[in-house]
Amino acid sequence: MQAMIECIKMQVKPVRVPPGKLLLGKVGNEYQCYFIDSGLAVVYSDTNPKPLCMIKGSHLFGLSKILCPKGGYSIKIIHASDVYAIPAGELLTIIEENNQWQSLASCLSDFVHVISNRNDKERKSHTATLILQTLEMLQNESEEVRLAHTVNDYVGAITGLSHSTVIRGIDGLKKQGSIDIKNGLLLRFERR
């Protein structure tokens, strides 16, 4: 996989993508693959408003569209990130030229494993704990990230909880005096 990523880095110029930006899985008639060098992002399917997964750190996304170009996805950038965008057809050429089929199969297998285990983890997580952990993450983010996302949007994007569930959770924390929000932005969070 590292050889494939190095080839992408040599052939594609990275773009600095700000927090809150949405990367589309299909541009025109062609699927895109994205190598996100660092940061945090959330992946969504076109068929479901809940997040598919969270991408943290160095990650190559969109590989499944090389073998099965159906459906769509988008990636919401949470942290400012350097992103290498490459059309799926061009990545397919890189894979072929560098004999990276085994690496691709291994990567896709890992991704299937992560998705299949995601539902089990979600069921086991308690909503209140999930919201508290996400608020702690938001509180520890840079000012740039905190200003780019409202509390409700950030918690919803990271957790995949419904808008109404997020609002109920945040309202409960407000009543407890654990959180201060102004114009949707986090001013103070204190876990009690």
Image: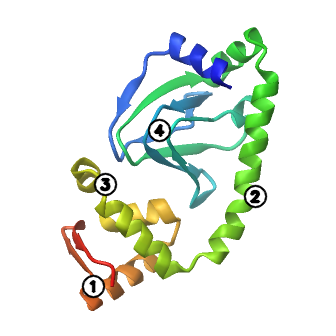
Image position of 91 (left or right of 8) = right
Q: Which residue is mark 1?
A: 174
Q: Which comes sooner in the sequence, label 1 or label 3?
A: 3
The reply to whether the C-beta atoms of the residues labelled 2 and 4 are less than 8 Å apart is no
Type of residue at label 3? Glu
Along the horizontal axis of the image, is 124 left or right of 19?
right
Tell me the CA gap for discs 1 and 3.
20 Å
Q: Mark number for residue 141? A: 3
Pointer 4: what residue?
23
Quadrant in which residue 173 is drawn: bottom left
**Can you say which quadrant of the picture contains the C terminus?**
bottom left
* Label 4 element class: strand
> Mark 2 is on which residue type?
Ser
The residues tagged by marks 2 and 4 sit, at their Cα atoms, a distance apart of 24 Å
Of marks 1 and 3, the one in the foreground = 3
Q: Residue 29's x, y, as percent? A: 61, 27
Q: What distance separates the C-alpha of mark 4 from that of mark 1?
A: 33 Å
Residue 81 at x, y percent in the picture = 39, 36
Q: Earlier in the sequence, mark 3 or mark 4?
A: 4
> Which comes before the other along the chain, label 2 or label 1?
2
Label 1 secondary element = helix
Secondary structure found at label 3: loop
> What residue do we see at 37% from left, 45% from top?
79
Q: Residue at x 43, y 42 (%)?
A: 39
Residue under circle 2? 116
Q: Few, some or many C-alpha atoms within 10 Å of disc 3 (few <14, some 14-19, many ≥20)?
A: some
